[in-house]
């Protein structure tokens, strides 16, 4: 379909865990890096926005995984933008094997940020850049859930360091995922395959921030919440085994 673009990748050795399958964070990196590449290729990436002190920031994200590809496996990642409102742009993704079987579906919602003032910007200010590439294809999965507050125990503390931050000077999305998975028993990670993970971002985690991660377990569902030292909620996530 017009304005759907496909990129081919191969699972590299550094992107697998001890099960020789791609890690969740590496799959997320393939997806979000492709979002940046595709936006740049089409003329509305951060390179086009930065002269105006603008950048893209992730607001919500969901990934549904039926299986994790093994080391050296090739796959096709298809992406498209199909919805834009005043403050949110929706970008979609599917990952499929060489036989065309989709094994991962994902949806991301993005806001545009003035990185000097650190405030959201109306997307209509760049509508002429992205409008020609909006696609009518439906999203491959349900939109990210709106996650509610939890009351739970702190399971991990983390100080935001140099290796955590990205070009937007806040903690990278995949670092949240890494920290979450670091709290899980190794036996669970060995078996983890089919899942859905939702993430909501509320505030930025900046260099030097002291973070606390809380976790609440409900049967096959785990709920997470990152807070800073002031008690502000930065990010919520849910992980559902399927």
Image (tube, grey):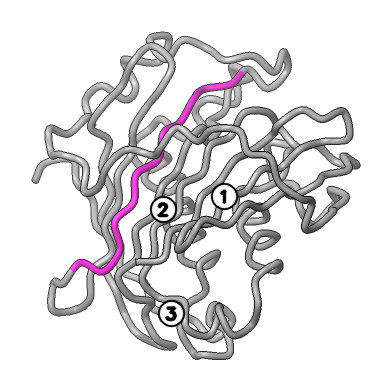
For the point 40% across and 37% down, the residue is 145
> Which residue, as the protein is rendered here, is positioned at the far left?
1
Sooner in the amino-acid sequence: mark 1 or mark 2: 2
The residue that disc 2 covers is: 34
Percent position (x, y) of residue 219? Answer: 47, 61
Q: Which residues are magenta?
A: 102-113
Q: Which residue is mark 3?
A: 11
Q: Nearer the viewer, residue 6 or 25?
A: 25
Left-right relation of 231 to 53: right
Query: Is 198 on the left-hand or right-hand side of 194?
Result: right
Q: Which residue is mark 1?
A: 223
In the depicted view, which residue is nearer to us: 213 or 60?
A: 213
Q: Is residue 81 above or below residue 35?
A: above
Image quadrant assignment for residue 222: bottom right
Q: Examine the image and state in which quarter residue 8 appears.
A: bottom left
Disc 2 residue crowd, few under 14, some 14–19, many 20+, Cα 10 Å = some
> Alpha-carbon distance for marks 1 and 3?
29 Å
In the image, residue 220 lies in the stretch drawn in magenta:
no
Find residue 138 and report its horizontal and vertical position in percent.
15, 39
- Per the image, label 2 sits on a secondary structure element best described as helix
Could you tell me residue 55's position as x and y percent?
57, 28
Identity of the residue drawn at 49% across and 28% down: 48
Sooner in the amino-acid sequence: mark 3 or mark 2: 3
Q: Nearer the viewer, residue 234 or 231?
A: 231
Foreground disc of the pair 1, 3: 1
- Which element carries disc 3, helix, strand or loop? loop
Q: Is residue 101 left or right of residue 28?
A: left
- 10 Å crowding of disc 1: few (<14), some (14-19), many (20+): many
């Amino acid at each position: 379909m017009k304005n759907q673009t496909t990129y081919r990748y191969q699972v590299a050795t550094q992107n697998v865990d001890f099960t020789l399958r791609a890690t969740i964070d590496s799959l997320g990196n393939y997806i979000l890096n492709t979002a940046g590449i595709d936006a740049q290729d089409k003329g509305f990436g951060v390179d086009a926005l930065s002269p105006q002190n603008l950048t893209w920031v992730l607001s919500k994200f969901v990934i549904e995984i039926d299986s994790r590809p093994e080391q050296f496996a090739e796959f096709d990642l298809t992406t498209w933008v199909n919805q834009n409102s005043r403050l949110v742009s929706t970008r979609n993704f599917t990952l499929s094997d060489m036989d065309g079987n989709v094994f991962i579906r994902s949806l991301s919602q993005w806001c545009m940020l003035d990185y000097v003032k650190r405030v959201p910007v109306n997307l209509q200010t760049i509508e002429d850049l992205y409008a020609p590439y909006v696609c009518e294809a439906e999203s491959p999965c349900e939109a990210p859930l709106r996650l509610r507050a939890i009351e739970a125990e702190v399971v991990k503390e983390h100080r935001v360091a140099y290796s955590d931050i990205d070009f937007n000077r806040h903690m990278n999305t995949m670092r949240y995922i890494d920290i979450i998975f670091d709290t899980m028993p190794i036996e669970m990670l060995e078996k983890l395959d089919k899942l859905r993970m939702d993430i909501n971002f509320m505030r930025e985690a900046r260099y030097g921030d002291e973070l606390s991660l809380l976790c609440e377990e409900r049967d096959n569902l785990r709920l997470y919440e990152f807070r800073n030292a002031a008690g502000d909620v930065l990010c919520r996530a849910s992980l559902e085994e399927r």
